[in-house]
Amino acid sequence: MQVFNLIALSYDRLIAIMHPLHYHAKVNHRFMLSLIASFWVFVIIATVVLVGLLTRLSFCRSVVIDSYFCDHGQIYRLACNDNTPNYVFALFIIVLVLWLPLSFILLSYVCIGYALSKVATAQERYKAFKTCTTHLSLVAIYFIPILITYTAGSQIHPNARIINLSLTSVFPPMLNPIIYVLQTQEIKASVKKIFSQKVRKQSKIKVKKVIIN
């Protein structure tokens, strides 16, 4: 779902910069709700299929996985019988939820960069690209650890695999509200107002202490 959310945000930025006049027509609530609903349906179906494929496996050697969560790859590799369907479907899922989304996001930013190159002034280009910084930071936080994990494959140390997958699972959802809040001007103004009020109160308290002394 994190990958599909990044795709939705990428599409949003692409339309907003390349077709600003048609933005509200192309990116409406009905379309986005349908898109998110289709993502959820796909995730649920893929998860059910993965779990179903695991139930056909038999484990005669060990049932202990070198992880603290049920990583599909760690489980099917322990099977004594043929795990080819699990391996093939795992590759299919990796391509579908990793490489294709990453390719779409990179291609969208190539198009965005091309569109921004036609903007008259550097200030306008910077202002338009600034709206993409939050999305790019989340893309980097999500994809860098998981790319290291899946491209290295069996060569990566099990502990490094666990750490990378944990970073991918925990950090993007945790940083989502923080990053987007920091980019919201109203929130920034409210935080600055609160801090300025605290500073004023502290300065008044210090002045009163000095007068009493």
Image: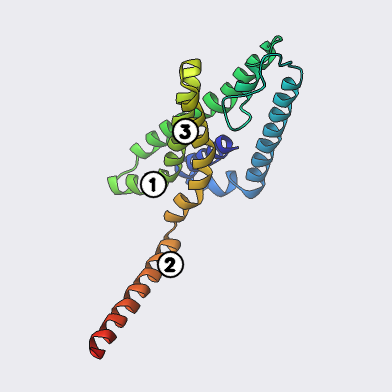
Q: Residue at point 37% right, 66% down?
A: 192
Residue placed most toward the observer, 173 or 100: 173
CA–CA distance in space, label 3 to label 1:
14 Å
Q: Please give the label number shown on residue 190.
A: 2
The 10 Å Cα crowd at callout 1, few under 14, some 14 to 19, many 20 or more, is some
Residue 65, quarter of the rendered image: top right
Kindly tell me whether residue 103 is visible in this rendering.
Answer: no
Nearer the N terminus, badge 1 or badge 2?
1
The 10 Å Cα crowd at callout 2, few under 14, some 14 to 19, many 20 or more, is few
Single out the mark in the foreground, 1 or 2.
2
The amino acid on which the numbered mark 1 sits, given as a three-letter code, is: Ala
Circle 3 — which element? helix
The 10 Å Cα crowd at callout 3, few under 14, some 14 to 19, many 20 or more, is some
Quarter holding the N terminus?
A: top right
Q: Residue at point 53% right, 44% down?
A: 173
The amino acid on which the numbered mark 2 sits, given as a three-letter code, is: Ser
Q: Residue at point 60% right, 22% down?
A: 74
Q: Residue at point 43% right, 33% down?
A: 111
Q: Which residue is mark 1?
A: 128
Residue at far top of view: 82
Circle 2 — which element? helix
Nearer the N terminus, badge 3 or badge 2?
3
The amino acid on which the numbered mark 3 sits, given as a three-letter code, is: Ser
Residue placed most toward the observer, 168 or 120: 168
Residue placed most toward the observer, 26 or 133: 133
Q: Which residue is mark 3?
A: 108
